[in-house]
Image: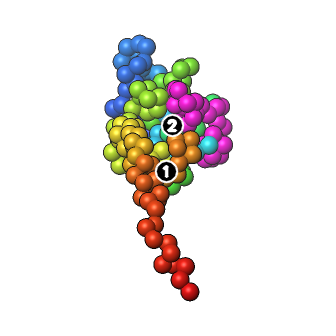
Amino acid sequence: MTTVTSPSIELSSYRDQHFKGSTREQDRLLRTSTTLYVGNLSFYTTEEQIYELFSKCGDVKRVIMGLDKFKKTPCGFCFVEYYVRQDAESSMRYINGRKLDDRIIRTDWDAGFVEGRQYGRGKTGGQVRDEYRTDFDGGRGGYGKIIQQKVSTPVRDEYRTDFDGGRGGYGKIIQQKVSTPVQDVSVFNRV
């Protein structure tokens, strides 16, 4: 009897570059794993939402939310571990490509969660892909980190148009325009 494997549950070409072991060992673990990597999550998706969705395919052993390594806030990925491979396969088949929090999520096999992998690997603490993104994505924190750094360059005090009590009120140019005295107010007092 020939076993036909669904394309959605086969191994992808992605391999964790930080895996401690050989490619052969990683492939062996991926073929027997009960752990899934889940990507493209909103930063606002909760662990409870993940558990609720993935438990529709079987008993979830645990959910490990991906966190920014500096802020310890969610950064758009997680790991879902099942008790049995068959439930993980069902999840790959039926949940991969579905929407959660208005985002199409991606699932992929993982060789098994190791402590420390829950933290983003990017220089700024989150995921690497979010550092180089140039488009605005409200579900993933706005613009990419590099763009945010360029845009958030502080404005010099004299050009500020907002009121900032901690920095002397309005910017210097606005203060000059507002405090320019009216030349002859007596014209307004005529009866």
Q: What residue does disc 1 label? A: 170
Question: Extreme top residue here?
Answer: 21
Question: What amino acid is found at the position of numbered circle 1 in the picture?
Answer: Tyr
Read off the magenta span: 47-74
Q: Is residue 122 left or right of residue 79?
A: left
- Rendering coords of residue 25 (x, y %): 41, 16
Element type at mark 2: strand
Q: Residue at x 47, y 39 (%)?
A: 39
Q: Nearer the viewer, residue 164 or 185?
A: 185
Q: Residue at x 41, y 26 (%)?
A: 123
Which residue is at 42% across, 43% downward?
157
Q: Are marks 1 and 2 in contact (CB under 8 Å)?
A: no
Would you say residue 70 sits in the magenta stretch? yes
| Disc number lying in front (1 or 2) | 1
Give the camera-side residue of 31 and 142: 142
Q: Residues within 10 Å of mark 2 (few under 14, many from 20)?
A: many
Residue 31 lies, in percent from the top left, at 45, 27
Please state which of residues 145 and 103 is positioned toward the viewer in this rendering.
Answer: 145
Identify the image's colour scheme: rainbow, by chain, secondary structure or one colour.
rainbow
Q: Quadrant of the N terminus?
A: top left
Residue 83 on the magenta segment: no
Q: Amino acid at mark 2?
A: Cys
Near mark 1 (Cα within 10 A), the count class, few <14, some 14-19 or many ≥20, is some
Q: Which residue is tagged 2?
A: 75
* Res. 95 in view: no
User: Mark 2 or mark 1, which is nearer the start of the sequence?
Assistant: 2
Q: CA distance from mark 1 to mark 2?
A: 36 Å
SS state under label 1: loop
Residue 155 on image: x %, y %: 40, 43
Tell me the quarter of the picture where residue 63 sits. top right
Q: Is residue 138 above or below residue 91?
A: below
Q: Quadrant of the C terminus?
A: bottom right
